[in-house]
Amino acid sequence: MEEVIQAAEKIKTMEIRGAARIAKYAAEVLMKYANRARDFDREMKKASEILLNTRPTAVSLYNAINFVMNYSGSTIEEKRSDLVRRAREFISWVETAQQRIGEIGEKRIKDGYVILTHCNSSAALSVIKKAHENGKKIEVIATESRPRLQGHLTAKELKSFGIEVTLIVDSAVRYFINNVDCVIVGADTITANGALINKIGTSQIAIAAKEARTPFMVAAETYKFSPKTLFGELVVIEERDPSEVAPKELLDLGVKVRNPAFDVTPRDYIDVIITEIGAIPPEMAYIIITERLGYSSISDEELRINARHFD
Ligand code: RI2
């Protein structure tokens, strides 16, 4: 179990981060651990709980773990090989979905576009990179994304692809929004009513974009849609340590610091969600959860048990 605990620590401290990356990593960790588990059901359940109790907001983690843990079989060997098969399937879902999102989303990017992005989203960057690959001359404005500065990762990544990028502080978004042709961000979770939960600051960008009539697009694989919200649960917004925001001397003075990692953008601000199965309006979230993720067949009670199991 030590390796699972270490893996969980990497997710918690954000050494491994990004909604898709943590989901894929959890599937990889479960797959490896399955080869070692002896008291199979009990040990796998324990491992999945440890991984799930790391970051509460990105539903991709919950969906990945549920997907992998939905194994069946009558012997331990059968269960093990079914779990490994499911983990592999999830990992390839992540990879192919991001590629598809790039192909679908890049059609929304015209030659000469200036695109604003926030934080560091592999799905959003897949769209931007694909547009560049297809010969479109584009420029990107990347917000630095306080407090963890994931915008630096975005700037580096785009630069290494040969894409022009300008880094700005988060509070400069409205200053630049009239120079921007479209906004594209990723998602940690999309709720049943089409709201987006993404890196803190996303909703302010959405407001600025709406005011300036700038299209606001979200790139999100279907495993970022939340089945739990269909059954009425609210998304838990992770609050991280104050030390990420303020220096010790300020904290020692007793200054109160709040550090929510995510915020909520209502669906009215979203023009389109680019998923691997198409460019859809946020109103289609319900259909994705029921028909694509298959949660129409699960009873309310089953879902509650499931949710409790992972609490
Ligand atoms: P991809 C990140 O969260 C950001 O909020 C980003 O928009 C989202 O995950 C999706 O990332 P964090 O882990 O899955 O940096 O598109 O807190 O890579």
Image (cartoon, helix red, strand yellow):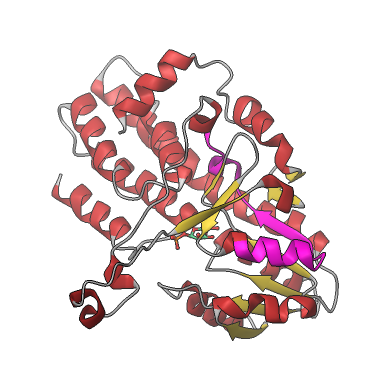
- Residues 304 and 248: in front is 248
Residue 237 at x, y percent in the picture: 42, 49
Locate the C terminus by quadrant: top left
Taking the magenta stretch, the answer to whether it contains residue 81 is: no
Name the one closer to the observer, 133 or 109.
109
- Asked where in the image residue 124 lies, by quadrant, the reply is bottom right
Q: Which residues are magenta?
A: 204-226
Q: Who's the residue at 42% across and 16% down the image?
A: 302
Reply yes or no: does residue 210 show up in magenta: yes
Residue at the image position 29 percent from the left and 43 percent from the top: 53
**Identity of the residue drawn at 73% across and 60% down:** 216
List x then y, in percent, for residue 205: 64, 66
Where, by quadrant of the figure, is residue 245 drawn?
bottom left
Task: Tell me, yes or no, if residue 298 can be seen here.
Answer: yes
> x%, y% of residue 69?
36, 30
The residue lying at 50 percent from left, 62 percent from top is 200
* Rendered position, 139 above or below 255: below
Seen as rendered, the residue at the extreme front is 254
**Vertical comparison of 50 with 150: above or below:** above
